[in-house]
Image (cartoon, rainbow, N blue to C red):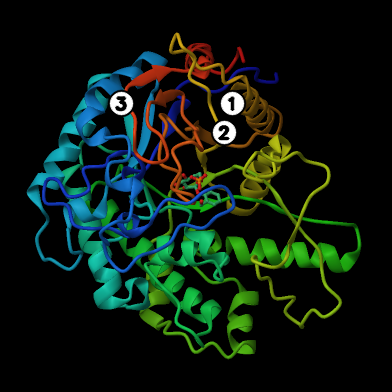
Amino acid sequence: MTKTTLPDGFLWGGAVAAHQVEGAYNVGGKGLSVADVMTAAGNQEERRITAGVQPGEFYPNHEAVDFYHRYPADIKLLAEMGFTCFRTSIAWSRIFPQGDELEPNEAGLAFYDRLFDECLKYGIEPVVTLSHFEMPYHLVTQYGGFRSRQTITFFTRFARAVFTRFRDKVKYWLTFNEINNQTNYDRAFTLFTNSGIQVHAGENAEAVMYQAAHYEVVASSLAVQIGHSINPDFQIGAMVAFSPVYPASDQPRDVFKAQRAMQSRFWFSDVQVEGQYPTWLTRYFQAKHFDLDITQADLANLKRGTVDYLGFSYYMSFATQATDHEDDQFSYNEAHDLVTNRFVPQSEWGWQVDPQGLRYALNWMNDRYHLPLFIVENGIGAIDQLEADHTVHDQYRIDYLRDHIVQMKLAVLEDGVDVMGYTPWSAIDIVSASTGQLSKRYGFIYVDRNDDGSGSLARYRKDSFYWYQHVIATNGAEL
Ligand code: P53
């Protein structure tokens, strides 16, 4: 008999990241993170990365939406929506303010004790990312972020501290958020937020990326091993940004280019799930003369520290086509090789909205990885209008989420894909990661704050809040 409903215990919630909501950037002993030195930008405009915190600059993450002080009321609203889980991250620089200390900062740990207790009080399961674009800034200036092998040690020390402290409060973990964004190594934002790296003139950014990402997959594999030794019940996942790359035509060259693009974007999860490098990539390193520091001990750790599940974000799909001058590798450079897909509409920020791509994504990962999958981000950034009566009529957000949930249900019910849960981005309005805007809104809960930092920070329920509440109450049956 065909199942018609999602499984009992399916996790429904929403997601945020510490740096995008908490604010209180210098409270409780917190050190600066990479997010604290990025300015606000606009649509199609990149955030600037400044050398430390500079006077006269505006840094939107410093205050964000003040979740650090307002979390009890905010969690209460999430409980009202019926959340059974809540995804956030632990700001690394609250726990290790500089990153290279030997002992964690007690005030930082105590904050997350209070936050997780507040969630558990309502039966909300925390889903926690260890590193969500929040590396301590001191690690950037002193060690070059994940350029340095030492940063593996700093990361695993952080992981051990929080696994130990929250052993009985948090079961679901994710190691590195969207570890594969840096496939787009020519974009300053991705290498900085993923790896704490700024590329110097004359450097080969691609080689720099592969070295840093190697250290990160090793750090992830060590964290998995440490976590399981602290609590064997921990479910520790990897996390990739899943934008499928379609061929722009049925020309074989385009199809192969798209395959190479997919391999380039998803070797990160290949390694984290399968515990070894794909063959094409080992050959690619040789062909490109990348002299990478990859040791036998690293390879053994990758095998020992494979993940329990795969988390992913899904916002959009991409398309690519081959040029007339491909090298033997059909080398994929995301900054140049994407083309517009004329069959799908775009958001105001140019993100290609493709609900069926979510079903494609779920099937693709299920075939390749044979692990439970967790949709830990999905959503649309849009301008919302707060009406005089404090309502927000965000029908476009409801439409987007409904269309994606329909495709998720098809993947689960028709295709038999094992999906653990769904946490749309974002639970509450946040500071956009790529633009620093507040006006690129994602939440079910409106926050009265503007791009320049003005506003009362008051919270209001959007129409999508009530819609999603009903979706959860019916376990996805009524959309
Ligand atoms: P913003 C690129 C592509 C897909 C997801 O993004 C991405 C990015 C990086 O911008 O980021 C994730 O805020 C990320 C969140 C972020 C969210 O998607 O740039 O995990 O931190 O806020 C939305 O519009």
* Amino acid of disc 1: Arg
Q: Quadrant of residue 14?
A: top left
Instruction: Judge whether residue 82 can be spotted in this image.
Output: no
Residue mark closest to the camera, 2 vs 1: 2
Instruction: Judge whether residue 441 can be spotted in this image.
Output: yes
Does residue 10 lie above or below 164 as drawn? above
Packing grade of label 3 (10 A; few <14, some 14-19, many >=20) is few
**What residue is shown at x 70% (from left), y 76% (from top)?**
331
Task: Report the quarter where the C terminus lies.
Answer: top right
Q: Position of residue 206 (x, y in %)?
A: 55, 77
Disc number placed over residue 456 in the picture, else none: 3
177, 431: nearer the viewer? 431
Disc 2 element: loop
Task: Report the quarter where the N terminus lies.
Answer: top right
Residue mark closest to the camera, 3 vs 2: 3
**What residue is shown at x 29% (from left), y 52% (from top)?**
228
Check whether the beta carbons of the residues at disc 2 and disc 1 lie within 8 A of each other. Answer: yes
Does residue 219 lie above or below 128 as drawn? below
Where does label 2 land, which residue? 382
First reached walking from the N terminus: tag 2 or tag 1? 2
Check whether the beta carbons of the residues at disc 3 and disc 2 lie within 8 A of each other. Answer: no
Q: How far apart in space, not on screen, are marks 3 and 1 (Cα)?
A: 24 Å
Q: Determine whether, in the image, residue 378 is placed left or right of residue 431.
A: right
Disc number placed over residue 397 in the picture, else none: 1
Q: Position of residue 49 (x, y in %)?
A: 39, 64
Disc number placed over residue 113 in the picture, else none: none
* Amino acid of disc 3: Ser
Q: How far apart in space, not on screen, are marks 2 and 1 (Cα)?
A: 8 Å
Disc 1 element: helix
First reached walking from the N terminus: tag 3 or tag 2? 2
* Amino acid of disc 2: Ala
